[in-house]
Image (spheres, rainbow, N blue to C red):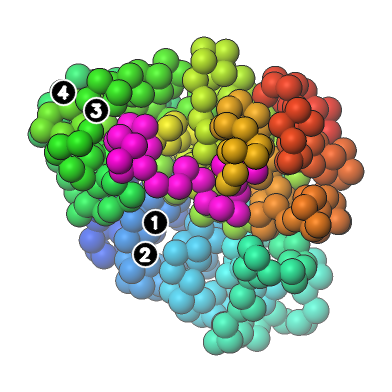
Amino acid sequence: MTPPNTTPDELLTPALTTPESFDAARTARLVAQLDHEDREIRRAASWAVRFVIVETPSLADHCTGQFRRVLRDADARPVALRTLSVVAEYNPEAVAEVVNGAVKERTITRLVGTNIVAGYRPPEYGSDGTVITDEGDDSGTGAEAVETDADPEPDPTPESDAEPGPTPEIPTGRPPATPPAKLPRLDRPLTAYEPITSDTQSGGRLDAVVQFSVDGREFTGLRRRSQAIAGVDHDAFVRAVNRWRQIDDHDAVTTVVDYGTRPTPWLVTERSVTGSLADRKAPLSAPEARWILCRLADALTYAHATGVLHGGLHPGAVAVVETVEDADAWAYPRVDDWRIDDLFGSANAHAPVPRRYAAPEHLSPDRFGGVDTASDIYGVGAVGYELLTGRPPVRENGEIRPASAVAPDVSDALSTTLTKCLRTAKMERYVSAAALKRDLEAAGGA
């Protein structure tokens, strides 16, 4: 068992920095801390479990009994359910086993169980000081098992004309009080960064998760290096990295930790444990989507003022960083991959943005002009469209179909703002990211 004098930091730090080091027994001990008498220990354990399961989803298979035990404690139930709702995104089978057992034990009702399996994250405390209300549950006793054998209906593909299904129940949450801390800048050789995953190929580069220590604390980052030793312009690489570093002090821009050119161009950036906006389950609530878009617009305003262009903004290019101090706060967006193709040479370049998010000038520069700041405005619109409707922008007869026509819950003001971002002609889009942010705020606040 965890020692009685364990602090929240002692639970969180290893799970955040070296989640791959956890085995089944160590993970089960974390789950057991979800019913600790100290509320801060419970919250820290919840975040620690999430980081570990995101890294190794199969570990949840060994913790189902611990989860069911914790759910029997009314005080611990809120944080346990919120933890399970995140785990369900990575190991739904294990969560279904926990939920079915809890329903049979009458620890939770069928409605609560169904919501958790669907990814609903309840607030930590309900009006009665405990947690969960089961309004709308018509099951009477709530003792029936949750049906989980059938596969869910597949989401419509981006190219499909089918309308998305009903908007899922979405947690409200709130913006974090302060942005998550950023990693420090370092000046070390490539060998100082120890790979903890195998290289994966991405275009002309190889990516791997690495670990390193600073002042006795362990961190993880993402190492990206050129796949080829020859054929990369080292001077162009350094200029490209320095452009990124000009703006990485912004809270909504991914930090470049370190870089070098030997034996081949490489850089290390901060790493998001939970992935990018492409990994989020859209649609999001309008307040959260607006808040994210305002952060992106603010980052672009900062970048454009210094002459730095992104040029390929889409959901996969926006990392999300959890605020571990506040479990109910929204994850913070950070724009990543600033001209990543330039960093590893044009010979290795691949499409700067997936076609379904591409601006007209990405696809036909001879006809629509080159990629510039107006292309970044289009990117914000494409990201926002998917966050609010659950799908990339839909074109009908050459024009983008208004978001409010795809998802009726989207307000007319917000839909109009996105439509302006997505205009075919650059001159019809917002003149600046700052102007876009003003309209986003006016459409409902950030």
User: What is the span of residues highlighted in magenta in the rendered image?
Assistant: 341-362
Q: Secondary structure at mark 1?
A: helix
Q: Are marks 1 and 3 in contact (CB under 8 Å)?
A: no
For disc 2, the marked residue is 57
Q: Residue 142: percent from the left, percent from the top?
A: 69, 79
- The outermost residue toward the right is 412
Residue depth check, mark 2 versus mark 4: number of the one nearer the observer: 4
Q: CA distance from mark 1 to mark 3?
A: 37 Å
> Which residue is found at the position 50% from the left and 63% from the top?
89
Is the residue marked by circle 3 packed among few (<14), some (14-19), or many (20+) residues within 10 Å? some
Query: Circle 1 sits on which residue?
Result: 54
Mark sitting earlier along the chain (1/4) = 1
Kindly indicate whether the residue at mark 4 contacts the one at mark 2 (C-beta within 8 angstroms).
no
Of callouts 2 and 4, the N-terminal one: 2
Determine the secondary structure under disc 4. loop
At 52% across and 25% down in the image, what residue appears?
309
- The numbered mark, 4 or 3, whose residue comes first in the sequence reads 4
Type of amino acid at the residue the image marks with label 3: Asp
Q: Quadrant of residue 262?
A: top left
The residue type indicated by label 2 comes to: Pro
Nearer to us: label 4 or label 3: 3
Residue 23 rendering spot, x and y as whole percentages = 23, 61
Q: Does residue 44 appear left or right of residue 228 in this picture? A: right
CB under 8 Å between discs 2 and 1: yes
Q: Nearer the viewer, mark 3 or mark 2?
A: 3
**Spatial CA span between label 4 and label 3:** 21 Å
Observer-side mark, 1 or 4, equals 4
43 shown above or below 70: above
The mark that comes first in sequence, 1 or 3, is 1
